Image (cartoon, helix red, strand yellow):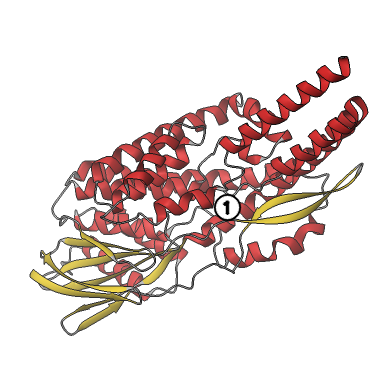
Amino acid sequence: MRVLIRNVVLCVCLATLLAGCATRSLFQPYPSQAQSWKSALGPSGGASAIKRLQDGAESRDGVLYLQELGRVEQLAGDDRASRDAFAGAFVHYQQNDEAARLRASSLVSNTGALLINDNARPYVAPDYERIYAHAYQALNYWADGDVTGTAVELRAAANEQRVAANRRDGEIADANSGANDLDLSRYQGYFEGLDAAAGRVKASFQNAWTFYLSALFWEAHGEYNDALVDYKKALEIQPDLDFIKEDVQRVSRSLDGARPLRGQGLVAVLFEQGFVPERQPLSLPIPTPHGIFVVSFPTYGLQGKPAPYPLTVRAGALESKTRVLADVGGLAAKNLREQVPGLLLRQTLRATAKYNLQKKANDDFGPVGALFTQLFNVVSEQADLRGWLSLPAYGQATRLLLPPGQQTLILSTPGGSATLTVPVVEGGLTVIHVAAPPGRLLTRVLPVQEGAL
């Protein structure tokens, strides 16, 4: 009778585990979920996809779904709904920052993750996602004509980059020190694809696209010191872009009292190409005191990473092509690469814990215990593939100096073209925000920026 009761308890626990895993999307990896709202991006929207994101916002991974919702609603043209979603994401940022300081909530959440997998950990938005969220929120305020709100969010995006830069070395040192007992060199070959995907990205928080956006805004409002600082930061990240060098020279002349935009206005095109690549699972052998365990590990590779292509902008006889300011896939890969020591340490501890669980179940419950632990290991060994997947693959930009008045622009990419008539104001700034999900070209002209703040 006692054996029967134990067997029944094991079966109930197994059923509960499988149900719990299903709710945590272990049977439907996050990239599969994201297909529904990625395919719904655009003015036509997708009510079912948005409803799914709204429901997900109430989960432990709420910050991730709110970021996705903010992006989807923005490209659907609902700036107010997008603004509300990003505001909710910012609340999560604050809560996570406080939890990191207290080191309490993370200790509780990591306990389950140690035995199951990293999907059991509540999602924490990495720095590059937080920076993009503030930049998108700035565009929401910009579209609504709220200059003050725009300025606040642009400063928040810059602050995220500054804070990330200040803490990055310490975080990497902590991750490496925590994994001192691991021979990381034995795993180098497994991460060659990850290193290749990161490309020329030096740090996961360096985003020239957001710096360039804010520099344009400050220049249009006569804040030349701030504009010069942000143009130079963008140029430091992307030193080969001649048009940013010209921007630095132009604002420097403005600081000296010149009027380099006399009889002209700035027309800037912010171009977002495709979707950021998805994480891929990688089988990785982890040695334990009891043998080798094969675990599933997230990674990126060059396969599936799109090549950048420009948006061509024509205004009469003038023509300009956008250039890449942010390789978002590279930022994501670099962020994951910086986490590798900590991920390897958790996987090693997890493999050891699972072995001990399996051994005890075999000893205590016999064949039923063996079946339970084997199924547990199969179900729970899933790589953490979560990430903000409606972000673009590349953030690009270009700009033209045009005479005041209504100007006709022709935009063209391999995926489509559009003709726009835009207002140009002497000394002012007209921004065209363009997104190109696969097979589409979404455009919107933001309100002209001019005059003192």
Residue underneath mark 1: 335
- 402, above or below 95, in the image: below
- 25, above or below 8, in the image: below
Q: Which of 150 and 418 is in front in this view?
A: 418
The residue under the point 28% across, 76% down is 412
User: Quick one: label 1, few (<14), some, or many (20+) residues within 10 Å?
Assistant: some
Q: Where is residue 222 in the image (x, y as percent from the top left)?
A: 19, 55
Which image quadrant is residue 229 in?
bottom left
User: Going by the picture, which residue comes out furthest to the bottom?
Assistant: 317
Q: Where is residue 408 in the image (x, y as percent from the top left)?
A: 13, 74
Q: Which of 153 and 37 is in front in this view?
A: 37
The residue under the point 53% across, 62% down is 330
**Total numbered circles:** 1
Circle 1: residue type: Asn
Which image quadrant is residue 1 in?
top right
Drawn side of residue 26 relative to residue 421, left or right? right
Drawn side of residue 375 relative to residue 390, left or right? right
Drawn side of residue 205 relative to residue 197, left or right? left
Q: Position of residue 357 (x, y in %)?
A: 83, 32
Kind of element beneath mark 1: helix
Examine the rendering and report whether any part of residue 33 can be seen. yes
Q: Position of residue 228 (x, y in %)?
A: 32, 59
Drawn side of residue 74 relative to residue 292, left or right? left
User: Going by the picture, which residue comes out furthest to the left?
Assistant: 405
Q: Which of 289 and 38 is in front in this view?
A: 38
Examine the rendering and report whether any part of residue 388 can be seen. no
The residue under the point 65% across, 27% down is 107
